Amino acid sequence: MKVNDCSDVSSQRAMMKMPLPAKARTQQVLLGSVGVLFVVVFSCVFYAAHTHQRMQQFQNDLTNIKASFQKRSADMENRFRRSVSQNNFVKKQIKHVVKRSPNESFFLQQGIHASTAPESNAGATYIRWGRRNCPEQDGTHLVYHGSAAGGHHTSTGGSTDIICLARNITYTQNGVHGGYIEGHQSASYLYGLEYRDSSWINALLDYSLTENIAVQFHSVPCAVCMVSERINQLMIPGRNECPRGWFLEYTGYMMSSGNSDKHGIRPLCVDDTPQVVPGTQGNQQGASLFMMETTCTSLLCEPVVAGREIRCVVCTI
């Protein structure tokens, strides 16, 4: 090798070991920064694009859920309308049949006309014992009135329930299906229910709405009443007012058969403004009705007071 060649190589090595100028170092730093910035920008763009895609998918899912919910709501509304339409159709058909019933004359004889009949088929019914009419308040209508009847007070059998026998009994034809047979064939008889207490009860009862000043030995009337837009009725012995939220129909006294009667009847809440069945009087010795009183035998004497009459109230809700 020549000497000059060796010197050239040494010179090149020396130049490589020399530090770069400031301008070159600046360029290298700038190039590195540009590379890093490019990587950051590319990453942000990629993340934004991915996030936008996910948001678009989320919005699509929400749109599908909303459409499905609206479709289900529309289906439910259509089913509900069909159900209401069917119910209205049934009600109209029933109302049509009632108008053409052969017993329509019975209700007309009771004084019930279309103007006083309940507008709705829904409601609660109860019997107002001791009255021939229903309370005069909105929503209450008379279905029919009649006479209270039950078993004889000396009988050991027969019905223990008192029924409200319609004033005008329907008889069709003798000796045919659905008709009647003259004479007594049955051993279960119905008797009119009589007030049996003497004049001592006059101080407890209000006769201002009746045609009599006493009720003893007269027959007990009854009225079947309907209260529209109610679903239930309740009789409360021992109270003269209704619970909160209930509507008061009438107040009265608890009455039942006498202690010495062989035939017991279920207690009734008899109106404290009583009436009688017109044309009945005298001691007919049918079914008996007496005022009930409390005793302390097996009842707590507080708040029960022995010898006092028992109030009652009929409520609807």
Image (tube, rainbow, N blue to C red):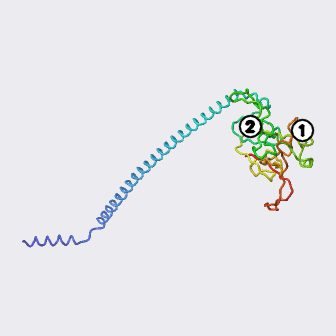
Residue placed most toward the observer, 17 or 134: 134
Whether residue 149 is visible here, answered yes or no, is yes
Kind of element beneath mark 1: loop
Which three-letter amino acid code belongs to the residue tagged 1?
Gln
Residue type pointed to by label 2? Ser
**For this view, does 7 lie left or right of residue 161?**
left
Residue depicted at 82% across the width and 59% down the height: 304
Which image quarter: residue 140? top right
List x then y, in percent, for residue 76.
55, 40
Q: Which residue is mark 2?
A: 186
Q: Is residue 79 left or right of residue 111?
A: left
The answer, for residue 255, to whether it is visible in the render is no
Q: Residue under circle 1?
A: 281
Where, quadrant-wise, is the N terminus in this rendering? bottom left
N-terminal of the two: label 2 or label 1? Answer: 2
233 vs 109, nearest the viewer: 109
| Tag 2 and tag 1, C-beta contact below 8 Å | no
* Residue 100 vs residue 15, the one in the foreground: 100
